[in-house]
Image: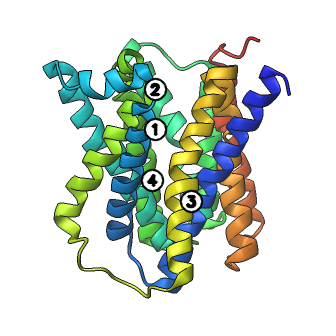
Amino acid sequence: MNKRTKGIAFAVLGGVLWGLSGVCAQYLFQYKGLNAPWLVGIRLVCAGIMILALSYTKREGRDAVINIWKEKRDALELILFSVFGMGACQFTYYSAVETSNAGTATVLSYTAPALIMIWVSLKLRRLPTVAEIFALILAVGGVFLLATHGDLNNLAIAEMGLVWGLISSVTLAAYSLIPVRVMHKFGTLPVLGWGMLISGVSLNFFTRPWDVPGIWDGKTFLFLAIAIVLGTVMSFSLYLEGVRLIGAAKASLFATSEPLMATISVAVFLNVSFILPDLIGLIMIICATVILTVFKGNLED
């Protein structure tokens, strides 16, 4: 495969594995009695250690893992990202999965690009472009269809599922905006690894990880391992390699395979039913993400 084909394949596979992580979590919640706070804390600590170890095997990553703590501003931004970006994003997303389903939670989180667009417009004190306004309308309309199926008098999904899903889109926007400077300075893997480890350790102070919930058998360990290794470490690694090969804008475009994977998987493997308004809402939100990505103007070869 040439460079472009490899980049596309890595970005798509990264998105697929992200979607798989949410489906594994739903299985653990639904059939094994685990809960979101405990699962998120353990997953982040394990994945953080693995990603830091992976980063440390590379010469430039080894220096960055240590040097990121040498200046106060860098350390403060890393801590802010860990708590209000990584930790908040993961906790709210998995809470949305627990109270609704992986497909709906993932699609709702994909309204984050529209929120980022609003923030950038306010920060730069400019009006949104026609394309951005159209994308925002699509995102809001998609959420409306997912939440109500077009009936204002009926909430089609669990109330807390909707609340957590919308909060997850806000925290995903924060996750995307807070670490930009330190990622440019130290690289992505060291920031992600420390972010996961710090947020996981912080969350475990409140969740008492030694008080293990649920039913533990071979399937529990298998799905937990898939969520950590494939759904976190491999997904980020593949996606970032895709970014290196074809650029961030193109990679994020092809990573929209995540909500598709999550929705198809929960329908096929976990018997979650989606009706026509759900599917239209999903398509509208993905289209909004695609429009905002394409009109960044960063898709040149």
Looking at the image, is mark 3 or mark 4 nearer the viewer? 3
Q: Is residue 284 visible?
A: yes
Q: Is residue 154 visible?
A: no
User: Marks 3/1: CA distance?
Assistant: 20 Å
Q: Earlier in the sequence, mark 2 or mark 4?
A: 2
- 9 on left or right of 157: right
Q: Which residue is mark 2?
A: 58
Q: Earlier in the sequence, mark 3 or mark 1?
A: 3
Query: How many neighbours does mark 2 have within 10 angstroms: few (below 14), some (14-19), or many (20 or more)?
Result: few
Q: Which residue is mark 1?
A: 54
Query: How many neighbours does mark 1 have within 10 angstroms: few (below 14), some (14-19), or many (20 or more)?
Result: some
Looking at the image, is mark 3 or mark 1 nearer the viewer? 1
Residue occupying image coordinates x 56% and y 76%: 27
Looking at the image, is mark 2 or mark 4 nearer the viewer? 2
Q: Name which residue type carries label 3.
A: Ser
Q: Earlier in the sequence, mark 3 or mark 2?
A: 3
For residue 21, the mark is 3
Q: Which residue is mark 4?
A: 166
Q: Are marks 1 and 2 in contact (CB under 8 Å)?
A: yes
Which type of secondary structure does the marked residue at label 2 adopt? loop
Residue occupying image coordinates x 34% and y 29%: 178
Query: How many neighbours does mark 4 have within 10 angstroms: few (below 14), some (14-19), or many (20 or more)?
Result: many
User: Marks 3/2: CA distance?
Assistant: 26 Å
Looking at the image, is mark 3 or mark 2 nearer the viewer? 2
- 14 on left or right of 71: right
Which type of secondary structure does the marked residue at label 1 adopt? helix
Q: Is residue 79 above or below residue 69?
A: below
Q: Name which residue type carries label 2.
A: Lys
Q: Earlier in the sequence, mark 4 or mark 1?
A: 1
User: Marks 3/4: CA distance?
Assistant: 19 Å
Residue occupying image coordinates x 37% and y 54%: 44
Q: Are marks 3 and 2 in contact (CB under 8 Å)?
A: no
